[in-house]
Amino acid sequence: MTEPEPSCPCAASYGKKQAGQAVKGETRPGRGKRELGKGGGRPPKYHQAFAALLTRIRKDHGRPRGKLLSPLIRGIIDFLTASKEPDYGISDETKALPVQVCGAPIDRCLHPHGRRYKSSA
């Protein structure tokens, strides 16, 4: 024997309570839509200038991966800040980031197909 078709097409995919509400036309109160232009989540920690700085340092020092690049940057950040030739243009806010970052975020910033951080260098 075949089962009879439900009166509402949503009755097959919802639970008993939700199907009854759908048949009656009731809707569940929701959060509503987010206002346009109002972003959510936490703000990005690493910005475009940081990704460009990492790309340049990596290129100048033989293209090491993040695991080796992180301690290298921690050791020479003061030298890079004071150097005039080549000028890396390291600001105070950019100087604090390489000291805090570990190898995995460096690799994510330097990945050629990364969606978040596109560097122009």
Image (tube, rainbow, N blue to C red):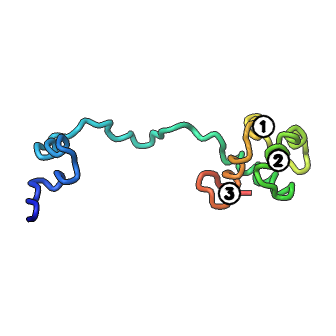
What residue would you read off at disc 2?
88
Spatial CA distance of label 1 from label 2 is: 16 Å
Helix, strand or loop at label 2? It is loop
Q: Amino acid at mark 2?
A: Tyr
Q: Residue furthest bottom?
A: 1
Q: Amino acid at mark 1?
A: Val
* Mark 1 / mark 2, whichever is N-terminal: 2
Residue 61 point in image, percent of width and height: 86, 55
Query: Within the image, what quadrant is residue 114 found in?
Result: bottom right
Q: Residue furthest front?
A: 1
Tag 1–tag 2 contact (CB < 8 Å): no
Q: Tag on residue 111?
A: 3
The mark lying in front, picked from 2 and 3, is: 3
Residue 84 point in image, percent of width and height: 90, 45
Q: Amino acid at mark 3?
A: His
Left-right relation of 16 to 111: left
What residue would you read off at disc 1?
99
Helix, strand or loop at label 3? It is loop
Could you tell me which residue is drawn at 47 percent across and 40 percent down? Answer: 39
Query: Neighbour class for label 3 at 10 Å: few (<14), some, many (≥20)?
Result: some
Q: Nearer the viewer, residue 106 or 81?
A: 106
Tag 2–tag 3 contact (CB < 8 Å): no
Spatial CA distance of label 2 from label 3 is: 20 Å
* Mark 3 / mark 1, whichever is N-terminal: 1
Left-right relation of 51 to 16: right
